[in-house]
Amino acid sequence: MPRFFSKCVLHIGTEKTGTTTLQRFLGENRALLAERGYFIPKSLSPYQVLANHERLTTTSLETTKLSDDLRRAARLETQADVIAHRVRVRDEFDQEVRQIETRIPMTLLLSNEHCHSRLISDDEVQTLYEFLSRYADDFEVIVYLRPQHELATSLYDQALKAGYADIDVLPDLGGTKIRWVEQRYFDYDDLTLRWGRVFASNKVRPRIFVREELIGESIIDDFLYAIGCDHKSSTARVEENKSMSSEFQSVLNAVNRYAKTHSEHISPGIRARLIAKLQGLSQGSGRRPTRMEAEEFYKRFVESNERVRQRHFPQRKSLFNPDFSSFPVQLPESPSELDALIRALVMVSAQ
């Protein structure tokens, strides 16, 4: 099969770095970006508009990983299902690509943050590379990095939305508590080396996700600048996937705990509607660790961050310059879980 694209730009995350906002913009502006030489496929995304190419991950994960929630959502229950899914994804993408009508050279533009969190072995990244190599001659892998304590704090909200209950805001990576996320999730040295071993180190281009360092303080403008697209002509957009308030995080935590023993009462549809309702009612920020906790968590990654700096950002004095002043010295007193549940019930009833 001839390669249709001279280049493939692959955005792999990381998670919690404005990916939903960026993917919605890409999905809503496919035609505009196509005029500028960027092809954003539809067949690799299970969403109507969102250009989140999750099928890159569901096809590239090891065949035996059947408990992954993305595969469960895609109803891949057996290894035979996974193999059939890979063939179907390839065939549908082949068909979409063959229908491109343009004479200008096109760059294949893909985005999926789960490449960061799920493709954790060289073999999985290699599977993705072999798939994409059928279509492109050259590659550029873009990944946004943010200070690990900020990533973990933001990830807590996402974990609640995924169904976890009674977990700490900052995961206990070295302790005795149930570990719901591994340390390597936050290890950017491990991440960039893994992708560099497969795609080549000089093809991996990390960028810093600190708002004041983003072009226009926008993930969209910064990403378009990074790929060489005119970043001044982007349309108005709204930041998405923000965290819910700490009060309603405790409500969702209670619901998650209940669902563990009463799953028959809480279907995926009910969960989705509940989360949307709580998100809409939320006022204020989500739970945050104390300043000391945030500092101690960040210190775990100082050495690996330095290796990333030396390899990719030699001009910087440090990979990040974290500001811990926004984290409380002591945690404020929070309403009880029961009070939060009652307040949520009252607010929902009043609408």
Image (tube, grey):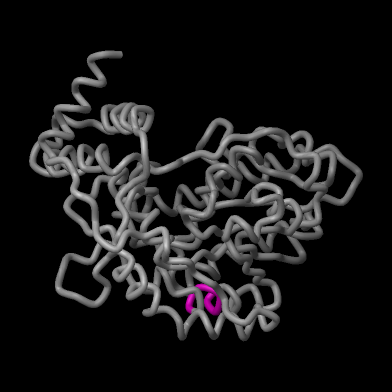
At x 24%, y 69%, the residue is 172
In the figure, residue 278 lies in which quadrant?
A: top left
Dividing the image into 4 quarters, which one contains the N terminus? Answer: bottom right
Q: Is residue 342 left or right of residue 8?
A: left
Residue at the far right in the pictured view: 103
Of residue 120 and residue 225, the one placed in the foreground of this image is 225
At x 54%, y 58%, the residue is 13
Please tell me whether residue 312 is drawn above or below residue 133 in the rendered image.
below
Q: Position of residue 204 (x, y in %)?
A: 65, 71
Of residue 129 and residue 257, the one placed in the foreground of this image is 257
Of residue 83 and residue 303, the one placed in the foreground of this image is 303
Q: Position of residue 117 (x, y in %)?
A: 43, 61
At x 47%, y 56%, the residue is 15
Magenta segment, which residues? 190-194
Q: Position of residue 235 (x, y in %)?
A: 72, 34
Q: Main secondary structure of the magenta part?
A: helix
Of residue 164 and residue 94, the one placed in the foreground of this image is 164
At x 11%, y 39%, the residue is 258
In the figure, residue 269 lies in which quadrant?
A: top left
Q: Position of residue 188 (x, y in %)?
A: 50, 74
